[in-house]
Image (cartoon, helix red, strand yellow):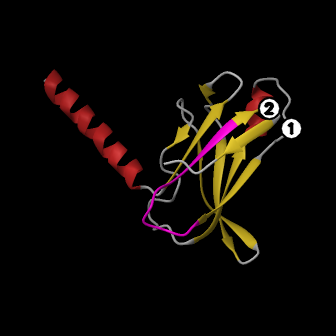
Amino acid sequence: MPQIKHLAFSLALALAAAAAAANPLSVHVLDLQNGQPTEGIRVTLEQRSGEQWRALANGVTNAQGRIAALYPDEKTIAAGEYRIVFETGEHYTKQGKQTFFPRIPVEFKVDAPAQHYHIPLLLSPYGYSTYRGN
């Protein structure tokens, strides 16, 4: 019986990983001050519609500082302009620290919808960096 439970657990993990891999968008937040993943950052994904931004999805970074599948599961990503907003001020408030950036908006363009888009954020209280990951 323990082998069946282990097999079922392994299958569930594999299915979750496959679903995340199929999702076209992921994020990762790392704290440059301590070199650790940043858990608990609220993140919102928005899409540009004319001059406005329309919210598509949101999530919270896990213990590894990741959201593996940020794009809505029921939709296919379309070419266009997107923005991810990292609510970093909440994180620093919980730590009792000041920050210069209460939220960090990262705008990017999807021009190849079949590709995976990964947006890492390297974070400190008074600076940040981001890039297109894989």
Question: Per the image, is 115 magenta?
Answer: yes
User: Where is residue 8 drawn, in percent x and y?
Assistant: 22, 35
**Residue 75 or 119: which is nearer the viewer?**
119
Indicate the amino acid at tag 1: Phe
Picture disc at residue 125 = 2
State yes or no: discs 2 and 1 in contact (Cβ < 8 Å): yes
Q: Point out residue 33 in the picture as x, y percentages from the top left corner.
A: 71, 24
For the point 54% across and 29% down, the residue is 63
Up-down: is 116 above or below 113?
above
Q: Who's the residue at 67% across and 29% down the image?
A: 31
Helix, strand or loop at label 1? It is loop
Q: Residue at the location (21% across, 27% down)?
A: 6
Q: Compared with residue 39, is residue 21 higher up or lower down, i.e. above or below?
A: below
Identified by mark 2, the residue type is Pro
Position of residue 38 measured from the top left corner of the image (x, y, whole percent): 63, 31
Q: In which quadrant of the rendered view does residue 39 lie?
A: top right
Q: Is residue 21 left or right of residue 66?
A: left
- Quick one: which residue is furthest to the bottom in this view? 50
Disc 1 target residue: 100
Looking at the image, which residue is at 86% across and 29% down?
Answer: 98
Element under label 2? Answer: loop
- How far apart are the two marked residues, 2 and 1, measured between alpha carbons? 6 Å
Q: Magenta stretch?
A: 110-122
Q: Left or right: 6 with respect to 79?
A: left
Q: How many residues crowd mark 1 within 10 Å: few (<14), some (14–19), many (20+)?
A: few
